Amino acid sequence: MSNFLLAANPRGGEGFRFRAANEEEVTAAAGRLRGAQAEWAVLSAGERMALLERWCLALRDRREEIVAALANDTGRRLLSEAEIDGALRRIDHWGRKAPELLAERSAGVSESVASVRFEHRAVPLGLVGVVSPWNFPLLLMLIDAVPALAAGCAVLCKPSEHTPRFVEPLMDAVRTVPEVAAVFDCVRGGPDTGSAVVDAVDAVCFTGSVATGRLVGARAGERLVPAFLELGGKDPLVVLADADIETAAATALRGSVVATGQACQSIERVYVHEAIYEAFVERLVAAASAATLNMERIDRGHLGPFIDPRQADRVEAQLADAVARGATLHCGGPRRRNGGVWCAPVVLTDVHHGMLLYREETFGPIVPVIAFANDDEAVRLANDSDFGLSAAVLGKAEHAVRVAGRLRAGAVSINDAGLTAQVGDVEKDSFGVSGVGRSRMGASGLLRFLRRQALLVQTAPPAPLDAFREVPR
Ligand code: NAD
């Protein structure tokens, strides 16, 4: 399966050709990392974090190179800077948190058997495989890799085949700290390489689509290794009658179109109280029409291109289906240039849940709006989805919190949208088909990479077999 792949340039022009790692190479990398993991795990958390901090410094030195590679692959500059800065902050965060979390020891006397003393130990899972998507290529790889390393695991990453360039400067930085290079590696390639990684590791962190998540989960199930699956979303935004209309329209737009809608926590469905619906739609359309594309220059405009050109086909198919079924398109739509595809924010009304764009993830800057009559209806509409990644509610604080608590989603932003993109220290599990496994945020983000081992010390004479002999009563 040794072959070359071509990552398209989303702004058009020349793509990037690279060789995909084959199964033998993946197995060899896994063997090497697994061999070094035990030595890494016996270091104290402080020692491991000091080495990861040295890696962090080397990454800082290569910030511009990494930003350039990400900008090439994603067609956007500001978010590429945000990615590397966010990743560096995550390393700092675990540098502070990991020693404290890993120092926690519990020991005592068992309540069930008073003669038994116990001690809990935390044992790293071993070699963790990280398979990640193209929408935030660096961040969504390191978000799992860094806490896994901090926990004492070795890590083998397989980033998306659509965004492979950043791997070189990243690995240059890794090689400056040999202790980290011994337990961290990246292999590049597509689905075959990803599936070889899933077959070679002791636990899998997968971020990507529901369809691939099902395959990865099934394979991990066959191998009986843990799988943490972070999958798609169809996030609703509920705008209550007591929300400020101007702010609500601006927040709905930003929450739906930032990163060209290519974010798992993008707002993809907007529900607005009927009393403010018309005024809200008017403001939303005005704001959406004023958003600009970075078609001419990467450093101008609000929205970049679609990173994976196939994404444009999916969005266009959903739009065509909605319009064919009676949707009104107020503004926006795809624009092509030099082989790249951009999309000006689209506002749709006269939409309903029978349309494709309500059943499938969109991953594009599309804002469909539906009116509701009361809180019960808003909650019913927002919960009418197989997904349950996150959600948002805008309105007077107490009212919004009440409605938020009724939503079936892992995190609900109140009086903002997509807060999980910024807040990393709170726990958040996925609901529905949006994911499986403990939260990647908060303390669980690290603790999920540890198995709990109990050491049980009997202080009384052990029971003889006679204690289990049946005797007549
Ligand atoms: P994808 O499922 O197509 O691919 C994700 C990764 O899996 C890629 O690296 C790919 O090469 C690899 N892969 C493909 N087939 C595989 C297989 N059989 N075995 C192992 N690996 C395989 O997803 P994508 O299109 O790259 O990313 C977009 C998706 O990611 C969207 O659905 C989005 O919602 C989701 N996402 C989720 C989160 C989250 O935190 N929940 C964050 C970002 C993106």
Image (cartoon, grey):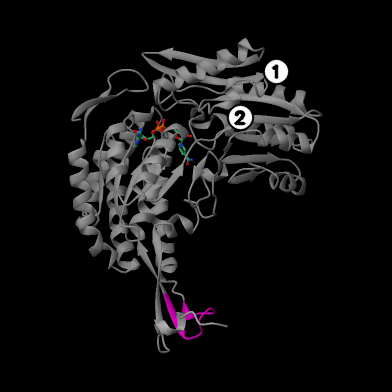
Q: Are marks 2 and 1 in contact (CB under 8 Å)?
A: no
Residue 303: percent from the left, percent from the top? 49, 26
Which residue occupies 66% across, 33% down? 384
Residue type at tag 2: Leu
Which residue occupies 66% across, 24% down? 353
The local crowd at label 2, few if under 14, some if 14 to 19, many if 20 or more residues have their Cα within 10 Å, is many
- Mark 2 and mark 1 lie on one chain; the one further toward the N terminus is 2
Q: In this view, does 237 lie above or below 143?
A: above
Image side of residue 350 versus residue 207, left or right:
right
Instruction: Tell me the quarter of the image containing the N terminus.
Output: top left
The local crowd at label 1, few if under 14, some if 14 to 19, many if 20 or more residues have their Cα within 10 Å, is some
Instruction: Tell me the quarter of the image containing the C terminus.
Output: bottom right
Splitting the image into 4 quarters, where does residue 189 fall? top left
Q: In which quarter of the image is ligand 1?
A: top left
| Span shown in magenta | 107-119
Which residue occupies 44% across, 71% down? 104
SS at mark 1 in the image:
loop
Residue type at tag 1: Asp
Is residue 113 rendered magenta in the image?
Answer: yes
Image side of residue 80 versus residue 187, left or right:
right
The Cα atoms of the two marked residues, 2 and 1, are separated by 18 Å
Look at the image and tell me whether residue 463 can be seen.
Answer: no
State the mark number for residue 253: 2
Image side of residue 331 versus residue 281, left or right:
left
Residue of label 1 = 350
Residue 343: percent from the left, percent from the top? 50, 19
Look at the image and tell me whether residue 59 can be seen.
Answer: yes
